[in-house]
Image (cartoon, rainbow, N blue to C red):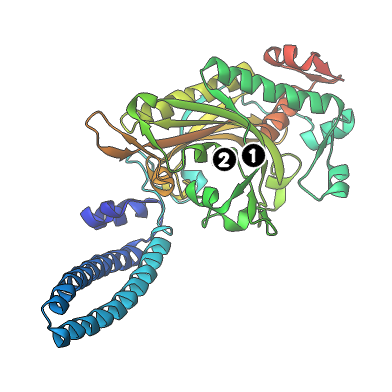
């Protein structure tokens, strides 16, 4: 959530920056600033009311002591009227504070100054590419390969649950587990502390990281207990620090977590959802950092480089794109996507997003730190997929297929216990 002081100081700047995200914030900000003035005026009136009540309360005792009963009773009547006004003012103030909070939640994070202008993914900026992007003739897509080698069963998943919930079998399950362990071990070498988080979170946690209200329709909701299934481990891991004040010496905080992820993906259809391309349940290893504001963009570059190194070790052709404003998420200030090239599908598959949210999430969750001067400030939060498994699996199967089987990259062979799927 944006800080109210940012809107007070330079509302026109906020409006112009959010235009980069193709978001018209003019009316919302005007309403927020109007309510902000009204709230501050109401607070002053309430303070004045309470001050008069306190003054009269002190006078009443003296008036009774000096025999001025009529004046004392008059003062008591005045206090009663003031208390009635106080109650009405408190109710009005509470309603206005709820309204301004609801409006503030509608405002996306400001994009970083380096974010390219654009409306769709076609306008994202390619900043790096590496590998062989030559299409392979007669290559089978992964949904055919998994049937041929009996390693993933989409039909069985549909029978058990529904579309988008595949069943991994035999070497397919072992390859999945190998990828998870490879990613976790790699993160540990980069000094990320491993967390095993809950897969269900409460509403406060979902609001804190920005999933609510923006992505409410994309989340699975457990109504009986008022919980949400996590769309990513980012949600529970970042919420570890909700309502905390850290010390400046605590930075950097670096966590990684494996979790299953659950997304409804409402409205998805066509080739983008076939096979492993888009699932309702999938596995992912997430990296999260809590950083000092002065070093968060340096950390973002380090996270980007780390994810790139994983793709290099997996010997996958990939590229890095900087998202344009129109493709940037509600909460992100700057995002890099890593995309692998599928030689069978002859298209790019997003496998990671690495983002800096600056203080947007921290403001929602009251994640603060005391700097060297003793001043309390908001921390910066960052996260990234390192990596999301379904499309990595798809690319590994498709790009490494031969006439007799599927070759396993050397970096994974100690984890799988086999060199090929045949």
Q: Position of residue 142 (x, y in %)?
A: 78, 34
Left or right position of 391 against 117 = right
Q: Against 126, is 262 above or below? A: below
Which residue does the numbered mark 2 point to in the structure image? 236
**Residue 336 or 341: which is nearer the viewer?**
336
Can the viewer see residue 141? no
**Residue 393 or 122: which is nearer the viewer?**
393
Give the secondary structure at mark 1.
loop
Q: Position of residue 211 (x, y in %)?
A: 53, 50
Q: Against 38, is 187 above or below? A: above
Q: Residue at x 26, y 83 (%)?
A: 81
Residue 332 position by quadrant: top left
Q: Residue at x 21, y 31 (%)?
A: 373
The Cα–Cα distance between marks 2 and 1, rounded to whole angstroms, is 7 Å
Marks 2/1 in contact by CB < 8 Å: the verdict is yes
Q: Position of residue 83 (x, y in %)?
A: 29, 77
Which mark is on residue 198? 1
Left or right position of 361 against 341 = left
Give the secondary structure at mark 2.
helix
- Total numbered circles: 2
């Amino acid at each position: 959530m944006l800080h109210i002081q940012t809107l007070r100081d330079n509302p026109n700047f906020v409006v112009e920056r959010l235009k980069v995200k193709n978001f018209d914030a003019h009316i919302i900000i005007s309403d927020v600033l109007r309510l902000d003035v009204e709230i501050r005026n109401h607070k002053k009136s309430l303070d004045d009311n309470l001050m008069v009540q306190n003054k009269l309360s002190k006078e009443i005792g003296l008036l009774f002591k000096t025999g001025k009963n009529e004046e004392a009773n008059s003062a008591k009547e005045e206090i009663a009227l003031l208390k009635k006004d106080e109650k009405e003012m408190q109710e009005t103030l509470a309603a206005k504070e709820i309204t301004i909070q609801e409006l503030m939640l509608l405002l996306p994070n400001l994009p970083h100054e380096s974010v390219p202008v654009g409306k769709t993914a076609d306008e994202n900026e390619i900043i790096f590419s590496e590998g062989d992007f030559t299409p392979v003739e007669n290559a089978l897509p992964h949904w055919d390969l998994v049937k041929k080698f009996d390693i993933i069963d989409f039909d069985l998943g549909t029978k058990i649950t529904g579309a988008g919930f595949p069943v991994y079998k035999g070497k397919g399950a072992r390859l999945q587990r190998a990828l998870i362990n490879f990613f976790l071990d790699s993160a540990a070498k980069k000094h990320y502390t491993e967390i095993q988080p809950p897969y269900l979170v409460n509403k406060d946690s979902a609001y804190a990281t920005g999933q609510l209200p923006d992505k409410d329709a994309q989340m699975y909701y457990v109504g009986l207990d008022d919980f949400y299934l996590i769309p990513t481990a980012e949600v529970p891991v970042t919420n570890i620090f909700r309502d905390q004040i850290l010390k400046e010496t605590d930075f950097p905080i670096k966590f990684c977590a494996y979790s299953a992820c659950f997304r409804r993906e409402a409205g998805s259809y066509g080739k983008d959802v076939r096979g492993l391309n888009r699932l309702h349940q999938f596995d992912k290893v997430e990296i999260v950092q809590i950083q000092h504001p002065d070093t968060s963009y340096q950390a973002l570059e380090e996270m980007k480089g780390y994810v790139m190194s994983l793709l290099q070790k997996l010997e996958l052709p990939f590229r890095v794109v900087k998202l344009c404003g129109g493709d940037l998420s509600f909460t992100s200030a700057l995002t890099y996507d890593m995309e692998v090239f599928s030689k069978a599908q002859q298209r790019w598959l997003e496998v990671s997003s690495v983002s800096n949210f600056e203080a947007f999430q921290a403001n929602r969750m009251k994640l603060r730190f005391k700097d060297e001067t003793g001043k309390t400030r908001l921390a910066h939060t960052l996260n990234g997929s390192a990596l999301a498994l379904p499309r990595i699996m798809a690319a590994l199967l498709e790009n490494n297929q031969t006439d007799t089987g599927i070759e396993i990259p050397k970096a994974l062979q100690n984890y799988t216990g086999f060199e090929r799927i045949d």
